[in-house]
Image (tube, rainbow, N blue to C red):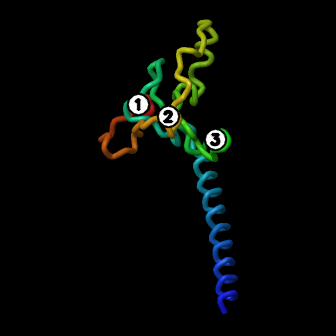
Amino acid sequence: MNDNLDAKIAAKEAEIETLRARRNEERAADLRAKPLLDRMIFAATARCHCGAGLAYDPAADGEPPFKGPSKWECSDILLFKTYDAERQAAVKAATHDEGFPFAFYEIKSERQPSQRGMTTRPEAEQ
């Protein structure tokens, strides 16, 4: 009798895992369908050395072993805003921070209730 129940539990767990994977794929597809700026999560107050706010793309594929975003990065780099200007001015990208891994830095996002609406999102796009 226990073997029968164990088999039923295993089958249900496999079905649940399949449904979770499908849900995650659909969520990722919905996120990727949005424009990059709309789906980005910005820091409430933390900024890169260049002055742009820190941000991450929740739909990004992370660096192994991560499956999603793993660090806060300069929003200008994520939005591809700086490369042309830096190339024309012959300025190195050293003016930007390397990135701040989530595991080592406690940076509050614009979605954090305790930040009371603060954001580093660019003014024109708010």
The residue that appears at 59% across and 16% down in the rendered structure is: 93
Whether pointer 3 and pointer 2 mark residues with C-beta atoms closer than 8 Å, the reply is no
What separation in Å lies between label 3 and label 2 (alpha carbons)? Answer: 14 Å
Find numbered disc 3 in the image and state the secondary structure of the residue it sits on: loop
Circle 1 residue: 120
Residue 24, position in %: x, y? Answer: 61, 57
Measured in 3D between alpha carbons, the distance from the residue under mark 1 to the one under mark 3, in whole angstroms, is 23 Å
Q: Quadrant where the N terminus lies?
A: bottom right
Residue picked out by circle 3: 62
- Front residue (pair 8, 79): 8
- Crowd around label 1: few <14 · some 14–19 · many ≥20 (10 Å): many
Task: Specify the farthest residue to the front.
Answer: 2
Of callouts 3 and 2, which one flags the residue occurring earlier in the amino acid sequence? Answer: 2
Against 10, residue 119 (above or below) is: above
Sequence-wise, which precedes: disc 1 or disc 2? 2
Residue type at tag 2: Ala
Answer with the quarter of the image where residue 13 lies.
Answer: bottom right
- Which mark is first along the chain, 3 or 1? 3
Residue drawn at 52 percent across, 29 percent down: 75
- Identify the residue at image location x=69%, y=87%: 3
Asked if marks 1 and 2 touch (Cβ < 8 Å), the reply is: yes
In this view, the mark in front (3 or 2)? 3
Query: As displayed, is residue 30 above or below residue 12?
Result: above
Residue type highlighted by circle 1: Thr
Residue 55: which numbered mark, if any? 2
Element type where label 2 sits in the image: strand
Looking at the image, which residue is at 41% across and 31% down? 120
Other residues around mark 2 within 10 Å, as few (<14) / some (14–19) / many (≥20): many
Disc 3 packing (10 Å; few <14; some 14–19; many ≥20)? some
